[in-house]
Image (cartoon, rainbow, N blue to C red):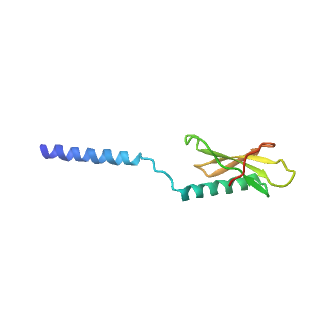
Amino acid sequence: MTRRLIALAATVTLATTATMAGGIAHASSPAAWAQFDKRVTRACVAASGIRNARPSTIVGFDDRTGMVAMLVSDRTRGSSMSKLCLYNKRTQKAYVDDAEMWSAPPQR
């Protein structure tokens, strides 16, 4: 009987540990963030259709939204064309709409 209780306790401990380990959040490396930024920028610039594009820095939202945003502006002198881009992190698709006269600092 005692051996069964010890075996059961060990099984419960291992199952609990495995469950808890699965829920631990891991921080992304700087290289992973750089790759994500590049992917978002490419998708937003392509979706904007602006040939001489100047992408802004990425604006992150709470992870529950699953989205980030970016303003893509036309670098052409005298142009005020801008597109607001929403990037869906799950589907990796970019959605744009006109954001005429909006402004944001460019990426560094």
Nearest to the observer: residue 108 or residue 59 = 108
Rendered-image quadrant of the C terminus? bottom right
Q: Residue at x 51, y 53 (%)?
A: 28
Q: Residue at x 42, y 47 (%)?
A: 24
Q: Residue at x 57, y 40 (%)?
A: 62
Q: Residue furthest right?
A: 78
Find residue 89 and report its horizontal and vertical position in percent: 59, 49
- Does residue 14 appear left or right of residue 102 in this picture? left
Nearest to the observer: residue 65 or residue 61 = 61
Nearest to the observer: residue 61 or residue 104 = 104
- Does residue 49 appear left or right of residue 14 in this picture? right
Q: Residue furthest left?
A: 1
Counting labels gives 0
Rendered-image quadrant of the N terminus? top left
Find residue 61 and report its horizontal and vertical position in percent: 60, 42
Find residue 13 and report its horizontal and vertical position in percent: 27, 45
Which of the 4 quarters of the picture holds residue 52? bottom right
Find residue 102 and report its horizontal and vertical position in percent: 77, 42
- Does residue 78 appear left or right of residue 71 in this picture? right
